[in-house]
Image (spheres, rainbow, N blue to C red):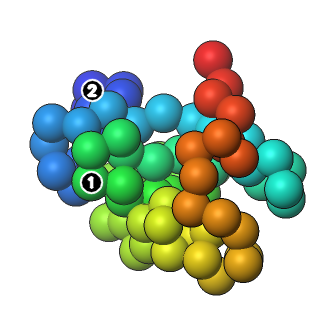
Amino acid sequence: MESNECTECDYGTVARYRVTATQEIVQFCDECEALWDAEEDRTSPSVTTIEQFLTVRGLPLLRSGLVPLV
Ligand SMILES: [Zn+2]
């Protein structure tokens, strides 16, 4: 599998981020916003999106609360 290609939409790029408010590490697609836990290998379908993830935690839907990891 191509390392950063999104398996949900097939054209987005998945990157890892730290959620500042909770210090959780997640990975999500910049196109379809499909989200996986940091340890998931993304061969399994995404069960949530970054928007749902933030909403469930009562966090603002802002990218500024997410720190990209390299
Ligand atoms: Zn995608």
Q: Is residue 9 above or below residue 48?
A: above
Seen at 58% across and 70% down, the residue is: 53
Crowdedness of circle 1 by 10 Å Cα count: few (<14), some, many (20+)? some
Q: Is residue 53 visible?
A: yes
| Disc on res. 2 | 2
Q: Which residue is mark 1?
A: 32
Q: Amino acid at mark 2?
A: Glu
Seen at 85% across and 59% down, the residue is: 22
Q: Is residue 50 above or below residue 2?
A: below
Q: Are marks 1 and 2 in contact (CB under 8 Å)?
A: no
Crowdedness of circle 2 by 10 Å Cα count: few (<14), some, many (20+)? few
Q: Is residue 38 visible?
A: no
- Could you tell me residue 66's position as x and y percent? 67, 42
Q: Mark 1: is the Cβ under 8 angstroms from ligand 1?
A: yes
Q: Is residue 8 left or right of residue 17?
A: left
Residue 6: image quadrant is: top left
Seen at 36% across and 41% down, the residue is: 30
Q: Is residue 25 left or right of residue 63?
A: right
Sequence-first disc among 1 and 2: 2
Q: Is residue 5 above or below residue 53?
A: above
CA separation, marks 1 and 2? 17 Å
Residue 32: image quadrant is: bottom left
- Could you tell me residue 42's position as x and y percent? 40, 51
**Foreground pick, 25 / 54:** 54
